[in-house]
Image (spheres, helix red, strand yellow):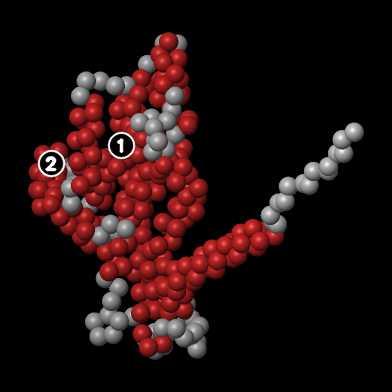
């Protein structure tokens, strides 16, 4: 007769220390994030506080102090000075970003789904355009716009249309790259099925590809809108005083004897609002569209 010995259950490590360690790590990350947020918001605080100060209080030595007298005079003056530039910036950035998105979608679609001999070479040449500095093409670009404008009988140099054209052409490489990388993620079987059903290139683009291209359009529109809205160099070289966008007008808000800090801060906030609105509306698509194609193609 054999005796049965009860087996001892395996010993398990207590879970409390693990939970405590994970909780401590979470609090450390939270504190670091809050610290980064505070550091990021310091300039915003100075901008807002200074913009509501009268000129007598708007001084670098009092940048951290709250206004003794709250006033919106600086906002009124800044809007009056910036309004023509804001209008010009919208006339530049809205059509320019939409045209760039349309051209990028066409190029990316053809280079990813409708292959042809030399497609890779052409795509490489497109990418080379991303590395050409603005300063290297400025004088030839001015001469080209003057000559083309005289030939066609239109005013390209000195106005908004020429500035839109310059940004659209300069944005073709990055827009093509974004759309091509995104369209690589679309299964080729969908394109082949549309061909079998008799759909041509444009029909396939319109019915199959464009309906799922929202994230790529969001990335390109954010990228191009921000680039055009914040542009200064092209705007100075290619436009005249009546066509100056926001950045040039913002640069000109300065006094001859004293610097109107409150007006400059208010103008800076006004000039940044449209780009912030674009990021708020389309930002959730930005990383999704930007990372599309990173692991495929």
Q: Which callout, 1 or 2, points to the residue nearer the camera?
A: 1
Q: Residues within 10 Å of mark 1 (few under 14, many from 20)?
A: many
Q: Where does label 1 land, which residue?
A: 176
- Which residue sits furthest right? 1
Q: Quadrant of residue 269?
A: bottom left
Front residue of 188/139: it is 188
Is residue 31 placed above or below 150 in the rendered structure?
below
Q: Quadrant of residue 231?
A: bottom left
Q: Is residue 7 left or right of residue 222?
A: right
Q: Which of pointers 1 and 2 lies earlier in the amino acid sequence? A: 2
Q: Position of residue 101 (x, y in %)?
A: 35, 39
Is residue 2 visible from the viewing direction of this image? yes
Is residue 184 placed above or below 161 in the rendered structure?
above
Q: Secondary structure at mark 1?
A: helix
Is residue 229 placed above or below 71 in the rendered structure?
above
Report the residue at 39% width, 32% height from top. Answer: 296
Q: Is residue 176 left or right of residue 207?
A: left
Q: Position of residue 188 (x, y in %)?
A: 41, 21
Residue 148's disc is 2
Front residue of 239/175: it is 175
Report the residue at 45% width, 46% height from top. Answer: 287
Report the residue at 26% width, 71% height from top. Answer: 252
Would you say the residues marked 1 and 2 are in contact, meaning their CB atoms lie under 8 Å apart? no
Is residue 146 visible from the viewing direction of this image? no
Residue 157's disc is none
Q: Residues within 10 Å of mark 2 (few under 14, many from 20)?
A: some
Report the residue at 35% width, 74% height from top. Answer: 264
Front residue of 277/70: it is 277
Q: Quadrant of the C terminus?
A: top left
Is residue 119 placed above or below 198 in the rendered structure?
below
């Amino acid at each position: 007769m054999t005796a049965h010995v009860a087996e001892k259950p395996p010993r398990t490590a207590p879970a409390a220390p693990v939970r405590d360690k994970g909780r401590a790590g979470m609090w450390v990350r939270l504190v670091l994030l809050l610290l980064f947020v505070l550091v990021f918001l310091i300039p915003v605080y100075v901008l807002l506080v200074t913009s509501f100060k009268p000129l007598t209080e708007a001084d670098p030595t009092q940048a951290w102090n709250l206004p003794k007298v709250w006033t919106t005079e600086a906002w009124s003056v800044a809007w009056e000075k910036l309004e023509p530039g804001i209008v010009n910036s919208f006339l530049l950035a809205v059509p320019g970003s939409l045209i760039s998105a349309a051209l990028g979608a066409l190029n990316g679609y053809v280079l990813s789904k409708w292959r042809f001999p030399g497609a890779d070479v052409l795509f490489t040449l497109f990418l080379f355009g991303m590395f050409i500095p603005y300063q290297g093409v400025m004088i030839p670009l001015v001469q080209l716009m003057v000559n083309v404008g005289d030939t066609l009988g239109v005013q390209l140099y000195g106005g908004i249309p020429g500035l839109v054209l310059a940004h659209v052409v300069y944005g073709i490489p990055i827009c093509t790259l974004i759309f091509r990388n995104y369209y690589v993620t679309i299964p080729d079987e969908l394109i082949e099925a549309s061909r079998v059903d008799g759909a041509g290139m444009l029909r396939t683009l319109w019915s199959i590809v464009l309906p799922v291209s929202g994230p790529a359009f969001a990335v390109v529109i954010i990228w191009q809108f921000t680039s055009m809205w914040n542009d200064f160099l092209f705007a100075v070289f290619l436009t005249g005083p009546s066509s100056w966008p926001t950045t040039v007008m913002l640069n000109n808000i300065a006094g001859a004897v004293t610097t109107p800090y409150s007006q400059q801060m208010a103008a800076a906030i006004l000039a940044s609002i449209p780009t912030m609105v674009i990021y708020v509306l389309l930002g959730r698509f930005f990383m999704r569209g930007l990372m599309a194609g990173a692991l495929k193609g």
